[in-house]
Amino acid sequence: MLKFQFIKFSSFFPSKPSFFPLSISTTIKLKSQMASYSSYSSSKLLFRQLFEKESSTYTYLLADASHAEKPALLIDPVDRTVDRDLSLIQELGLKLVYALNTHVHADHVTGTGLIKSKVPDVKSVISKASGATADIYVEQGDKIRFGNLYIEVRATPGHTLGCLTYVTGDGPDQPQPRMAFTGDTLLIRGCGRTDFQGGSSENLYKSVHSQIFTLPKDTLLYPAHDYKGFSVSTIGEEIQYNPRLTKDEETFKNIMGNLNLSYPKMIDVAVPANMVCGIQSKTG
Ligand SMILES: N[C@@H](CCC(=O)N[C@@H](CSS)C(=O)NCC(=O)O)C(=O)O
Ligand SMILES: [Fe+2]
């Protein structure tokens, strides 16, 4: 059996973040805005949903706007839109600290390596189970802190062996409702295919039911792709209406075994590139 060196990510950071309360009016405004818009700013969390149209990929920008340094992270950046994302980060006065991937993508090349070549202090993050190169490897339960905010790591294998879901922090000083960045594990009214990269419909079913559907129902669901025009859903909506994951496990496995999808056009280029963070760089 292969042995991996595990770096405990949470130990890199101070364990007790300071507390910046939201005013009641800000909280009420934030709650009503979060349900209706795909981007917003509160007194703490700055959030943007960004889209890459050739691969229908969403990239997410999160930052602690109340912190002096405005530390930020990107989830699932795409190589083709790196310049757009870095310009936005500069315009907003943010300091990009982490570039995270939910998994080794098969349909596009990650922007992580390109970002690191342009902003060398940025650290790449992925799961150890992905087998890919990155600066920091995370696993179930790890916390990725940026300013006084954090996201929590949930292992959700199934679409690929190393798939992760990133969930915003739980607690009175963290944004409410929570947000779940599910990568390709759970899509809006769909889910990731399970026919390559160590995919398993059994694992995906278990991951969604144990790690995602157990989140509060008002948790906002932000996937890595959408092919139908959706931008956001909630856990409650998917528990009720997801046409695949509402089924029993045997029916689900049958559905997944009969999708008959053609392989992503870029798979032969994207997977090897994404195993080394998108481009061959010194640290990955
Ligand atoms: N047509 C696209 C690839 C579409 C595709 O296979 N999407 C993946 C997510 S990217 S690995 C998927 O899991 N789809 C699930 C589904 O039900 O559509 C291309 O050629 O790139
Ligand atoms: Fe994928």
Image (cartoon, grey):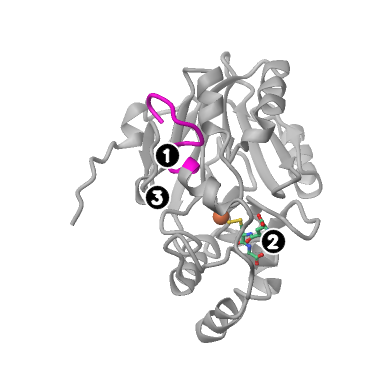
Residue at horizontal 43 percent and vertical 43 percent from the top: 275
Where residue 127 appears, x then y in whole percent? 40, 46
126, above or below 204, in the image = above
Residue at horizontal 60 percent and vertical 48 percent from the top: 178
Whether 247 is among the magenta residues is: no
**Alpha-carbon neighbours of circle 1 within 10 Å: few (<14), some, or many (≥20)?**
many
The amino acid type, in three-letter code, at marker 3 is: Ser
Where residue 5 appears, x then y in whole percent? 23, 40
User: Principal SS element in the magenta part?
Assistant: loop
Q: What numbered label is drawn on residue 143? A: 1
Is there a contact, CB below 8 Å, between mark 1 and mark 3?
A: no
Please indicate whether residue 194 sits to the left or right of residue 135 in the image. right
The amino acid type, in three-letter code, at marker 1 is: Lys
Q: Where is the N terminus found, in terms of image quarters?
A: bottom left
The span shown in magenta is: 273-284
**Alpha-carbon neighbours of circle 2 within 10 Å: few (<14), some, or many (≥20)?**
many
Q: What numbered label is drawn on residue 47? A: none
